[in-house]
Amino acid sequence: MAESLLSLGGVSRVYGTGVEVHALRNVSIDIRTGDLLSIVGPSGSGKSTLLGLLGLLDLPTSGVVTVQGRDATSLSDAERSRLRGEAIGFVFQQFHLIPHLTALANVETALLYRGLSAGERSRRAFEALERLGLGDRHDHRPVQLSGGEQQRVAIARAIVTEPLVVLADEPTGALDTANAANIMEIFDGLQSPERAVCIVTHDRDVARSTQRQISMLDGEVVADEEQATSRVIGP
Amino acid sequence: MRRFRELVRVAAAGLMARKVRTLLIMLGPILGVAAIVAAIGINESSKGYLKAKLQELGTDLIVANAQDSIGGFGQNPRIPAEAVVRVSRLPDVTSVTGTLQIANIVTLPFEAAYDYYRAFPVPVIATGLNLPQTMEVPLVSGRFLNDFDVASEARVAVIGRDLADEYGYLPGEARTISLNGIHYGVVGVLDWVLLEPSMDSAVFITFPTAERDWDTDGQDPTRLYIRAPTNTQWVAEEVPTVVSLGGPDGARTSIPTDLLDAQSQVDESLNNLTKMMGGLALIVGGVGIANVMSISVIQRSSEIGIRRALGHSRSTIAVQFLFEALTVGVLGGILGAAVGAGVVWLTSEARGYVMVLSVPGLALWALVSVGVAVVAGLYPSTKAARLEPLETLRLG
């Protein structure tokens, strides 16, 4: 039985005070262990807002966000930040590596302020890079890496903390087809019985390659369905 | 502690990534602290020589000049010999010497120099026998005037060191000096008298000889040198009373080292001015830090967003940026203090000062720089902490 890792219960998010924009209306999503799901929808459908809420970067106007059954909306910033660091790993469209740090230091950034020794941090960061085939590039800065390599560093950074959920925002959006296929393979590989992978995308091909697909439109979930087959995009 | 080290490392990496910018914002604290340290250091060092001299001289010599207690009516006031005895009996006084300068004597090493020495007369001083003890000055060679010289009214003289050099006097040489044509035998050379430089080129003779040869109208001195190691100030105030005892004789006392002491005092107003200017430089430097770091926070908003996404809390982000400011302040302060100290050292070397540099002062100004940097870093740090990660990460 898959257990719930991250769930939104009746969540609404309203921006602005004078002119109100309802970015999300009464959305309920439950991300469970073993999930490889995609959230699709056109621009303005509320994907980004949803990602912010799932990633504990934002708070809902109403409704609850729970992590393993624990309410995250009532936590202080420090507690929520800690929970975010432990439970969620982010992968962004623009990679968002810190430009002045090496690949290894970028991955290590996710392990800071957790009471780990410097040696332990770099050992774990190096292992994560190795896992993504970048062990020999650990001392390169982001500008010295290709787009696909940068995204793999970003994935290493997301998984080095052993998060419950990997949240990816258009992870293939800035990549060519071959690199995109490679990244999707990696996401396939990240899926495990203890973990969930959630990809937010407007790319139908990417969405079709996941087991579960949630469709958004105008701030509401219009479909949440398991797909019979998963197909990896690419040539 | 581990968290502290991590923060320092993250801040250092942030600063190292933009070396030129870091150096530029560090210039403010460096210049400010260096200016203050250098100005104060040079000011104090320029007085350091006087201070060292004061240390050497001691501050317990009193000079008493005869003066009519009624004020200005009597010509050529003198201090009666019995008054000198009274002064010497004061409990804090260890030594008293009376002197009398004799006017209108042309002193010559040899006849040919007559015109020169008439134009620039050498002082001739009748003195008590314990002058070297009272002035605490040794003889370079020979002996000082003694009881035998007094008893025999011998025509012997001791000369100051500068005069000895001027006359080409060799130690131990049997030589005479001509006072208005009367030859005196030179028996000794007195070393430099720092507190009374006029003695360096003077001729000293005994009172009885002076009275016999130069008609000094008795043997009363016009000036007393009084050594009082304890209660110096009090003795200086009492001596006029002790001399006059209500009578017509009087004396005015001074402590020559007081003047040196005053000169050796650091010019406070100049110091304050330089402190203010250095402080201004520090404040401007602080504004520079705040300014540049604010822009830096905007430029690094994506980094801040990532860090937030990776689980760093708002306060961690704030502390990270505050540490960057702190590092700028600490390094700027230390470098500034070092540069300032270097300037003081160079100046002292070049001008022959005794270098005076207060180490607590250096630390204090470095700390001020740290304080300024931290205050300057507060605004950018708060700004960094308040950034919304969702806005900086451009999701979706």
Image (cartoon, coloured by chain):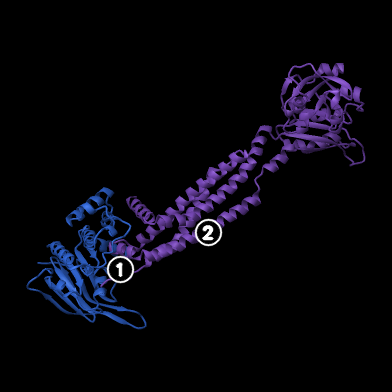
Chain colours: A blue, B purple
Asked if residue B89 shows in the view, the reply is no
- The amino acid sitting under disc 1 is Leu
The image position of residue B206, as x and y in percent, is 84, 23
> Considering the numbered disc 1 on the image, is that residue within a helix, a strand or a loop?
helix
Answer with mark 2 or mark 1, whichever residue precedes in sequence. 2
- Kindly identify which numbered label has been placed on residue B63: none
Q: Nearer the viewer, residue B93 or A144?
A: A144
Left or right: B285 in relation to B153? left
Disc 2 chain ID: B
- Kindly identify which numbered label has been placed on residue B393: 1
Left or right: A44 in relation to B381? left
Asked if residue B107 shows in the view, the reply is yes
Residue lying at 7% horizontally and 73% vertically, measured from the top left: A228
The answer to which image quadrant residue B59 occupies is top right
The answer to which image quadrant residue B66 occupies is top right
Residue lying at 17% horizontally and 77% vertically, measured from the top left: A215
What residue is pinned by disc 2?
Answer: B283
Q: Is residue A1 above or below residue B147?
A: below
The image position of residue B32, as x and y in percent, is 53, 53
Whole-angstrom CA distance, mark 2 to mark 1, is 35 Å
The image position of residue A207, as x and y in percent, is 15, 73
Residue lying at 44% horizontally and 60% vertically, measured from the top left: B377
Q: Is residue B44 above or below residue A210?
A: above
Q: Nearer the viewer, residue A99 or B137?
A: A99
Left or right: B17 in relation to B36? left
Q: Dot 2: few (<14), some (14–19), or many (≥20) neighbours within 10 Å? A: some
Position of the C terminus of chain B, as image quadrant, is bottom left
Q: Nearer the viewer, residue A54 or B324?
A: B324
The image position of residue B294, as x and y in percent, is 43, 64
> Considering the numbered disc 2 on the image, is that residue within a helix, a strand or a loop?
helix
- The amino acid sitting under disc 2 is Ile
